[in-house]
Amino acid sequence: MRQIVLDTETTGLSAENGDRIIEIGCVELLHRKLTGNNLHFYVNPERDSHEDALKVHGISNEFLRDKPKFGQIADQLLDYLAGAELIIHNAPFDISFLNKELQRLGREPIHSLIAGVTDSLVMAKDMFPGKRNGLDALCDRLGVDNSSRTLHGALLDAELLADVYINMTRGQDALIMELNETPSEGGEWVQIDLRSVQLPVLHANPLEIAAHATLLADIDKASKGRTVWRQHEPA
């Protein structure tokens, strides 16, 4: 599976009101592993950044004057993203800017050429309900070193988000073998018949059952009654 962790910096907060992309950072994951095949652009937005945006990203209008316009990097960007799943923190924001830039060029929306979009902010809110789920907060919570992040930067933020995403989804690949993996050095795949193996059944004792019930109640309380088991309780 090919995934691209993507982040943008912009002149302001509203693509519909004329704000533009000034920086794009992309980090490639292949089968959940960093490949180093990253992509990064500074983009001439053909307008100045808002003062508040400048305080966030620190990229001056003068610095961007001689950078390529979006139309000049669009083909390279789209070729790189084609067929991949995008991972974006607060995806509607970045997608709205990408689609607006593509619309100006008479191109199809980004969804027409990618496999899909995963919003890591939505994932984080589901995993950590009621907590701060910005990128810095997630780095702190998951042990990702963000000490070099003094200002927002698209490539740095994409690199941090890639580490955050891998940490948030670490359990997903525990029982999965990728089809294109190779056997260990000098070995061959060995198929083991487990049908004759009798696995012991360890039943929880009363204290463990009570502790489990308390944990479920705490999780249900934190999610304000939106847990799956609460929703599917018999009437």
Image (tube, rainbow, N blue to C red):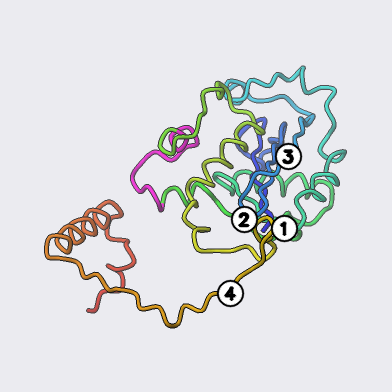
Residue closer to the observer: 37 or 151: 37
Spatial CA distance of label 2 from label 4 is 36 Å
Residue 176 at x, y = what percent? 55, 63
Residue closer to the observer: 133 or 22: 133
Q: Residues within 10 Å of mark 1 (few under 14, many from 20)?
A: some
Mark found first going from the N terminus, 4 or 1: 1
Task: Tell me, yes or no, whether the highlighted magenta stretch contains residue 129.
Answer: yes
- Report which residue position mark 3 lands on: 38
Task: Tell me, yes or no, whether the highlighted magenta stretch contains residue 124.
Answer: no
**Residue contact between numbered discs 1 and 2, judged by CB atoms under 8 Å:** yes
Spatial CA distance of label 4 from label 3 is 37 Å
Answer whether residue 45 is visible to the viewer in this image.
Answer: no
Mark found first going from the N terminus, 3 or 1: 3
- Report which residue position mark 2 lands on: 117
Q: Residue at x 52, y 48 (%)?
A: 120
Mark found first going from the N terminus, 4 or 3: 3
Residue type at mark 4? Gln
Q: Residues within 10 Å of mark 2 (few under 14, many from 20)?
A: some
Residue 189 at x, y = what percent? 64, 68
Q: Pick out the residue farthest to the left.
A: 206
